[in-house]
Image (cartoon, rainbow, N blue to C red):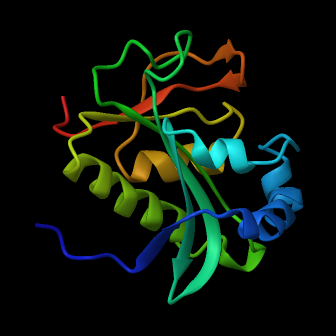
Amino acid sequence: MRKPGPYQFRPARLKDMPMVSAWQALPHVARWWDDDPVYDAADLADRRVSQWIVAVDGTPFGYLQDYDVHGWTDHHFSHLPPGARGIDQFIGPADMLGQGHGPGFIAQRMGDLFDAGAPVIAIDPHPDNTRAIAAYARVGFRKLGAPRQTRWGLILPMAAHRHPV
């Protein structure tokens, strides 16, 4: 059994939307995320996606969603094995960047997902987002191929395996 990590993940709620929307509008987030709301009431009810507010020492600073890659018939990760999860996330306040929080909370959530039985976790950063790609590589993600266009935009497919191959 793994030791609990320093990050707390609580389910996102509608009352968090003003905070998440403010984070999403910040230049370091807006550059990589479109301006559509991250979620609404229908999204929160969607059983394919788990949406989380990430905190450290009780202070919220990030958003993370993990999802069933088989929940959409044409998803670019649908070739992965049953139980595979995809993740997306961002850090809100700029003063939380560059402190190792990104790789830290991603690794902690990956551990939770692997413990729950996920054989593979996939992520799809924009190919120009070198900061994110380096953070993902630090926690075990490897490229699955060349960048490609999807209905969600241009991505670099990456994955981490429960039992590295």
Pick out the residue farthest to the left. 1
Residue visible at 35% across and 52% down? 110
Residue visible at 85% across and 50% down? 30
Pick out the residue farthest to the bottom. 57
User: Relative to residue 143, is residue 101 depicted above or below?
Assistant: below
Q: Position of residue 81 (x, y in %)?
A: 28, 20
Q: Position of residue 39 (x, y in %)?
A: 72, 48
Quarter of the figure with the C terminus: top left
Relative side of 84 to 115, left or right:
right
Quarter of the figure with the N terminus: bottom left
Relative side of 162 to 7, left or right:
left
User: Relative to residue 28, is residue 32 depicted above or below?
Assistant: above
Q: Position of residue 142 (x, y in %)?
A: 39, 33
What is the count of numbered marks?
0
Relative side of 28 to 138, left or right:
right
Relative side of 28 to 147, left or right:
right
